[in-house]
Image (cartoon, rainbow, N blue to C red):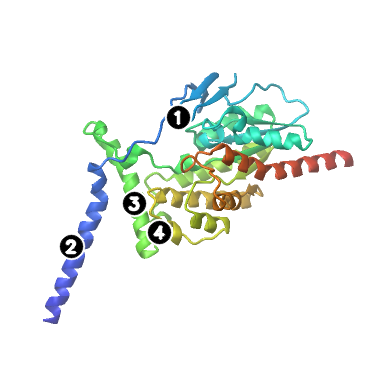
Amino acid sequence: MYIRHTKLIIIYTASTLTAYFLWVFFSYLIVPFDPPSYTIKINTWPQDGYFKILPGKYQNDKYNTFYSINSKGFRGPEYSVKGSKYRIIAIGESSTMGIESNDLETWPTKLQKYVTEDGHSVEVINCGIGSSTSDHHLKMIESEIIEYEPDIILYYAGVNDHSISASERYPGPGLWPKGRINYFKTWVIYKKAQMRFILLKWFAFDLEYIFPYPNNWKAKYTNNLKGMIAATKSSKCLFVIITQVMDCPLEVFEDLASNSENLNKILQMKNKQRVFFLRQNDLLRIQTRIAKENDIKVIDLYAAFFKAKKSGVKIFYDNIHLTPEGNKLIARRLAPYIEQELDKQYTKAIKE
């Protein structure tokens, strides 16, 4: 009798687990995700291995903001040969380009304003490009940015390297049957991300450490970041990593602000974006490790954003794009560091 009951329990348990995992793997094949909250078409300007934006004046209808693209394909006013001003170049994605804010409200523009108001002669060039990745940033630095002779590069990016697109969550009938290989390739990327979450939550086992495929973004991002640092070192330019912040519940902000290694709160989140927070945590670890290996400065923003969110300040429009207040927060956090570097240069010049 005991043996019979044991066999039944094993069979029922195995059947339940099998049914659950089949549901996990196949449910999203028939249930599409919601479309993005908004999309904006930008007029891209193809380059050799990357792209910029076609020069002109544009409007973001959703936020009723206006943005200017200069003749070099970057946001903001024109710039030319470097003069006596300390030149800062901001490199990043849409959260640096900042088309949710007007020209004078992006964090690079605000940074220039704050440092200039304190009596320093600086110019901050916004080279953020929406939808760009580290492949794009590396090629852009090697091909173009170094030629502008920056004194310092501020790097605020990474989420586009690990983000999971809507097509990966739900490849859709457009790829089937002719594109069935790409269909399964994109679908498997998201299924892998789901399985990672399930295994972490249930068994505290991280699948990513032993099986990073498909979409092994971490290896590519690591190599690209190392390449950027090498390129800037050869030009005697400072390269500074700014931790890219995603909006998340207050308790997760608190963990990140205290440099906690505990992922438990992220795993318990009900927010659908939790998979992205896991990957963003991977990104932060990569940046920290590479910065330490190369003696690179990392400026952490999580403590400042935690304090602002706790006080009720609206700093994000969605999980990554900044409000004008969010842009101010970054600029105010960076300004003291820039001024410190300027003071070092001034002291060095006096001694020489």
- Disc 2, SS: helix
Residue 194's mark?
A: 3
Pair 4/2: label in front: 4
Q: Mark 4 points at which residue?
A: 268
Q: Earlier in the sequence, mark 3 or mark 2?
A: 2
Report how far apart the C-alphas of labels 2 and 1 lie in the structure. Answer: 49 Å
Pointer 2: residues within 10 angstroms few (<14), some, or many (20+)?
A: few
Q: Kindly identify the residue that appears in the image at 76 percent across and 44 percent down.
A: 340
- Disc 1, SS: loop
Residue 235 shows in this picture: no
Nearer the observer, 207 or 330: 330
Q: Earlier in the sequence, mark 2 or mark 1?
A: 2
Q: Are marks 3 and 1 in contact (CB under 8 Å)?
A: no
Pair 3/1: label in front: 1
Pair 2/1: label in front: 1
The amino acid sitting under disc 1 is Lys
- Disc 4, SS: loop
Report how far apart the C-alphas of labels 3 and 1 lie in the structure. Answer: 32 Å
Q: Looking at this rendering, what residue extends furthest in the front direction?
A: 312
Residue 121 shows in this picture: yes
Pointer 4: residues within 10 angstroms few (<14), some, or many (20+)?
A: few
Report how far apart the C-alphas of labels 4 and 3 lie in the structure. Answer: 14 Å
Quarter holding residue 326: top right
Nearer the observer, 292 or 25: 25
The amino acid sitting under disc 2 is Ser
- Residue 306 shown left or right of residue 33 in the figure: right
Q: Name the residue under label 2.
A: 15
The amino acid sitting under disc 3 is Gln
Pointer 3: residues within 10 angstroms few (<14), some, or many (20+)?
A: some
Residue 200 pos. (x, y %): 38, 60
Pointer 1: residues within 10 angstroms few (<14), some, or many (20+)?
A: few
